[in-house]
Image (cartoon, helix red, strand yellow):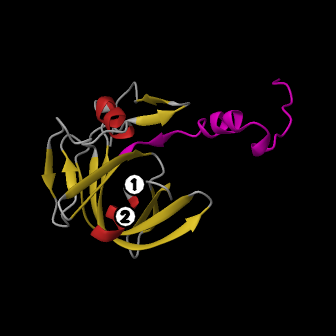
Amino acid sequence: MAPEVAFAVPGDDLRAYRQSLGTFPTGIAVMTAAHDGRRVGLTANSFGSVSLDPPLVLWNLRTCSSSLPVYRAAGHFGVNVLAWQQEEVSRQFATPADDRFTGVETTVGTTGAPLIAGCATQYECRLAGEFVTGDHVVLVGEVLRYRNFHREPLIFFRGDCRWFEQPVVS
């Protein structure tokens, strides 16, 4: 039998709290947008479904993000759910750079958002709403169209990228 573990308060040790959040595996997506000739993209593991009818998704980023004005002004964004082979793409879009798209093959979606080649799934969304909570803004998107390539996803778990060891049969 496992020993009893006491509850902790998040503010007492933010590192330990963050590590506890890492026990919940999530997918990894690169959120993209373009406006006035500026392309932005960043790695997020906060992507999730909100509703099937209407088809709504959400994700969040820090309120101080220099990319936030572009996502807002574009009024649309792309969700590029990364495939298991795209760990390097994940790291590239998580690292500050003048142009995170360097060397990454993309096409332009109908909304104008860059779509990254090789993904597991792609969504093109209209920005349907947002709200600020804590130090982040939650962006809600209406899914206008999507493509499912039926590739295994890249997973974020315990602070690192992972993938399924056995293929998932669909």
Q: Quadrant of the C terminus?
A: top left
Q: In which quarter of the image is the N terminus?
A: top right
Residue 140, position in %: x, y?
43, 68
The stretch of residues the image draws in magenta is: 1-29
- Which residue is rendered at x = 64% and y = 33% of the image? 19
Local secondary structure at mark 1: loop
| Disc 1 target residue | 66
- Which residue is rendered at x = 15% and y = 46% of the image? 106
User: What amino acid is at disc 2?
Assistant: Pro
Would you place residue 140 above or below residue 2 in this image?
below
Q: In which quarter of the image is residue 98?
A: top left
> Can residue 125 be spotted in the picture?
no
Say whether residue 3 is magenta.
Answer: yes
Question: Relative to 107, is 64 on the left or the right?
Answer: right
Q: Circle 1: is it few (<14), some (14-19), or many (20+) Cα within 10 Å?
A: few
Answer yes or no: do the residues labelled 2 and 1 have beta carbons within 8 Å?
Answer: yes
Residue 149, position in %: x, y?
22, 46
Give residue 100's mark: none
User: What amino acid is at disc 1?
Assistant: Ser
Residue 166, position in %: x, y?
38, 26
Give residue 69's mark: 2
Q: Which of 23 and 114 is in front in this view?
A: 114
Q: Nearer the viewer, residue 58 or 168?
A: 58
Would you place residue 29 above or below residue 38 in this image?
above
> Can residue 156 be spotted in the picture?
yes
Q: In which quarter of the image is residue 87?
A: top left
- Which residue is rendered at x = 40% and y = 24% of the image? 165
Question: Relative to 138, is 54 on the left or the right?
Answer: left
Would you place residue 132 above or below residue 164 in this image?
below
Question: Relative to 18, is 28 on the left or the right?
Answer: left
